[in-house]
Amino acid sequence: MQTNQLLAMFSGVLLLLGLIAFFLGRAKAARVRATGTAMYAQPDQYAWFAVLATAGPAITVGAIGALLMLLLGADIPTLYLLAGSLVIAAIGLLVGMSQVKPDFHARQAIERVIRWVLVAAAMISIFTTFGILFSIVFEALRFFQMHSFWDFITGTVWNPGASFLAAAGRGDEAGSAAQFGSVPLFAGTFMITAIAMLVAIPVGLLSAIYMAEFAPRRVRTLAKPTLEVLAGIPTVVYGFFAAITVAPIIVDVAGFFGLDASFNNAVAPGLVMGIMIIPFISSLSDDVINAVPDSMRQGSLALGMTKGETIRDVVIPAALPGIISASLLAVSRALGETMIVVMAAGMRPNLTANPLEDMTTVTVRIVAALTGDLEFESAETLSAFALGLVLFTVTLSLNLVSVLMIRRFREKYRVNNL
Amino acid sequence: MSQSFDDISAQLRRRHRQSSRLKWISMGALGLAGLFLVLFFADMLNKGLPAFQQTYVEVELTYNEDATRMGRAAMEPEDAKIVSRSFERLIPGMLRDDPDLLGTTETRWVLANGEVDQYLKGNRNKLSEAERQAVDEKVESGQVALKFNTTFFTEGDSKMSERAGIMAAAVGTVMTMLVTLAIAFPIGVMTAVYLEEFAPDNRLTQIIEININNLAAIPSILFGLLGLAIFINFFGVPRSSPLVGGMTLALMTLPVIIIATRTALRSVPDSIRHAAFGVGCSRWQVVRDHVLPLAMPGIMTGSIIGLAQAMGETAPLIIVGMVAFIPDVGASFTQAATVLPAQVFTWAGEPEQAFVEKTAGGILVLLAILIFLNATAVVLRKKFERRW
Amino acid sequence: MSRHESSRPEPGQPVTRNTDAHHELSIRVRDLSLWYGQSQALKNINIDVYQKNITALIGPSGCGKSTFLRCLNRMNDLIPSVRIEGLVEMDGRDVNAAKMDEVALRRRVGMVFQKPNPFPKSIYDNVVYAPRMHDLVSRKPEQDELVEKALRDAGLWEEVKDKLHQPGTSLSGGQQQRLCIARAIAVQPDVILMDEPTSALDPISTATIEDLMDKLKQQFTIITVTHNMQQAARVADYTAFFHLGEIIEYNDTRTMFANPATKKAEDYITGRYG
């Protein structure tokens, strides 16, 4: 029999057992209660307890068995495993039934189980983080066994071209050894991020100032969601926009000034990424500026300060931790942004300070390394995980610093909605 | 002795100018951001709207013996040049399915090929001067015309631009989102309920909270690495399938749903909980019967927004292989599929000019869906918004 | 003995004159009315405020005394739905006139708020910020001198002279409030408005601030809102009793508390309501 059919049968039988447990449990509890005995719980609660006792252990055993098969390669035939689970379900049913008695706290037992299920759900997010960490670190370590960490961090040439030959055991035939110096990739990443920030921080912050301090109420309630549309546009769409519309414009403009620009220049993706990030900065800054107590503004105005001076010298300094935190989040966002650069930036690792040249980024190389028909074991594929590890570390630190800063702001002004 | 009003006002003139300068500059910044948005949408509409029209040709088809082997034979050589090759290939099959057709003649509108279509839309194309004239004549006589492009909405991907459609990607998106929602919604809501209603304020809880905030800010491509290394390589989930794509996106959407649900739960006032405790409900009963129903609109809103976010996500799906070429509309969670943004990405990489409008057309469909979802969320929030 | 000469006063003038006090006019208010949207918060207020005196505004909460105070330096401008009619005159000028620059007005009419609100800057910068912007001081020694003088006048110098560059928020509540007073007097205003300056403070800080007010009235005209009748009795030269948006009685403080002219004021002062 197919595994699918086995699973379907297993589920069917388990469901049947569950139903039996429910109705038997309820009937028994109702009978006991009909005799006038005071019980700790309602008949339905006993019934649900019986269901839990039936299904819970059985499913757990099935899942653990499946996991063991995966992890240890232990060869338990699926049929036996599922059959075993069903036996356990039957035993669970009997135990559940025997617990239908007046002095058993069925409700408390159920709620204990529910609580554990909730805890398990909450742990998933932790597992996700560890999952990301482990998957990256594990593969990255394999990469660093092949290539030195130091070369990776400080090397200025990224040329993975020949690594697949090495993986195929023909390393000697390669004309030149593969080189994995990540400096050009990070230079490209930082260049594009810097351009994005040059667009996003002034525009975002000033927009926030206008919305929070000057704009009439109506404008503000309209402008904020409108700006947030910018953040809701899929990045693949921005990538297309950057590559097809913005990049040729940049080339034309550069040509007008007698400069030579590549169609994969860093300005186009940087600019478009900046536009995408505007709402990240404007929304959070607007919230933070609004959270600055009005008494500060009044204190300044009452001293004969103009509105502009009040904003510049009192409101913004007070909101600064929040604004910095928003900017850090935005930087982290820009560093990890993938689609825009994959579609609009270049593929060539290029260590240059000229944003009109084509240059590539960390995320572009990750995608490039993992989408070809390469052997998974090759150094180029594994290099994606090494790059991912660096990206993870950098963005994680930025996020943590940002969270700490916003927390400090929150404690200072006792605002809870940030 | 203090200064008079006039003296002070005179000193203030410069400072007032500075102040209003800040106002105008900041207003300009907001206007600039708005202008970006307008330009962006104008550009997408301009590029994408032509994709909803396609050139069709009226041809006379003679179903002769040759056409059972080579569809081209059914047409005048003149017509065969401008008809889509994708249609020629269908003719032998048509004859096999319906042998009665053999020997008959009919006139029908069929897809023109991509170059003719681009010529009619005034774009760059590879037609020769003579071919252009031929097409022009047919346009004059009404045998070539632009019509609404149903193919775009009913077909899967194709290497022939005139036949490429978004149906396969749309189905893939729906299946992927089903998986995402099936995983992220229950786990997200349960996590939020635990953190808001049950969790003691201890180390572990704080770690979970910080961790969730961090997950929300981790670059999406790293989720792709997780999907590749753990779901595909370790658990053996089929590559490129809606299952693995949905699972990967579920982990990404989880923090969004958790944060939205927590906000919704927090906005339910404690007085409700106290009242329920007061009549003897257990903590779980309070949550199930009183808090969750009141928080449901907020939870739904957050989930829709999370779903919209996941729907536009591409990078992690590329890593788990969901950029496959999918000509047929799929129906399985474990077979290779693609999604709308990935389809957009694939088309954007095609060198042919005709694919530019397909790409932009796909983008318009995607944006329309996202705007619809977000509008639903906003309406939902407005409708159920309650001030306690 | 006619230290208090009681007669029918002109509108806006106190029922009884305090013979110890100065009587040069500082702010003249005539028929001032104020609406928040539809609801009227002030009704035909008339009052003459005299220079270098402390005038206390008392009355039950919600009676409009804070609203009135904020009319004097146009802080109500910040609330969009407010409409004002009537005359507030200072230095021969209508404060509410379109031509009047409200920033210039606030420069001459300073304010201290209910809750201390130091800027998120150092103690030094809190004091020197406004004078520097107003070009009252420019060079560093001038600034140092000004900071010291303002802090001395506010009675805070001895406590903070060694930590001038710590943030203003690091001080205790009473110290913060005195810092705010130092900040206000550093710009050399004519009038200082105080909106329940001690209501957020402990009794010892309150006493310190009351002493300070008594000293400051040598240089400044002080108008203070207070919930606390004993405080009004202790520090004020004149007291105006507000009720439901009207001034019921404006009188020399001693007379007001010993022998009020109106029944309502007497009921309030003796604690029958409020």
Image: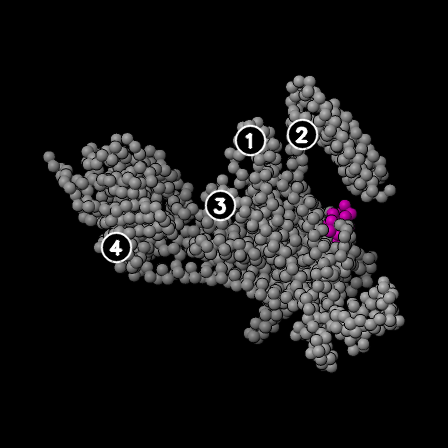
Circle 2 residue = A110
Chain hosting mark 1:
B
Question: From the viewer's perspective, is residue B388 above or below residue A317?
Answer: above
Q: Is residue C62 visible?
A: yes
Kindly report which numbered mark, 3 or 4, lies closer to the viewer in this rendering.
Answer: 4
* Image disc number at residue B276: 1
Q: Position of residue A206 (x, y in %)?
A: 47, 58
Secondary element at tag 3: helix
Decide: marks 3, 4 in contact (CB < 8 A)? no
Asked which secondary structure carries label 4, the reply is: strand
Count of numbered marks: 4
Q: Please, what is the three-letter code of the amino acid marked with disc 2?
A: Ile
Task: Name the one closer to the observer, C201 or C34.
Answer: C34
Name the residue type under label 1: Ala
Of B219 and B121, the residue lying toward us: B121
At label 3, the amino acid type is Phe
Q: Is residue B234 magenta?
A: yes
Question: Which is more N-terminal, label 2 or label 3?
Answer: 2
Q: CA distance from mark 3 to mark 2?
A: 42 Å
> Alpha-carbon neighbours of circle 1 within 10 Å: few (<14), some, or many (≥20)?
some
Quadrant for the C terminus of chain C in the image: top left
Query: What is the crowding at mark 4: few (fewer than 14 residues within 10 Å), some, or many (at least 20)?
Result: some
State the residue position of label 3: A409
Same-chain check, marks 2 and 4: no
Chain letter of disc 4?
C
User: How far apart, in angstroms, are the residues tagged by discs 3 and 4?
Assistant: 42 Å
Magenta part of the protein: which range? B231-245
Dot 3, how many residues are within 10 Å of its Cα: few (below 14), some (14-19), or many (20+)?
Answer: many
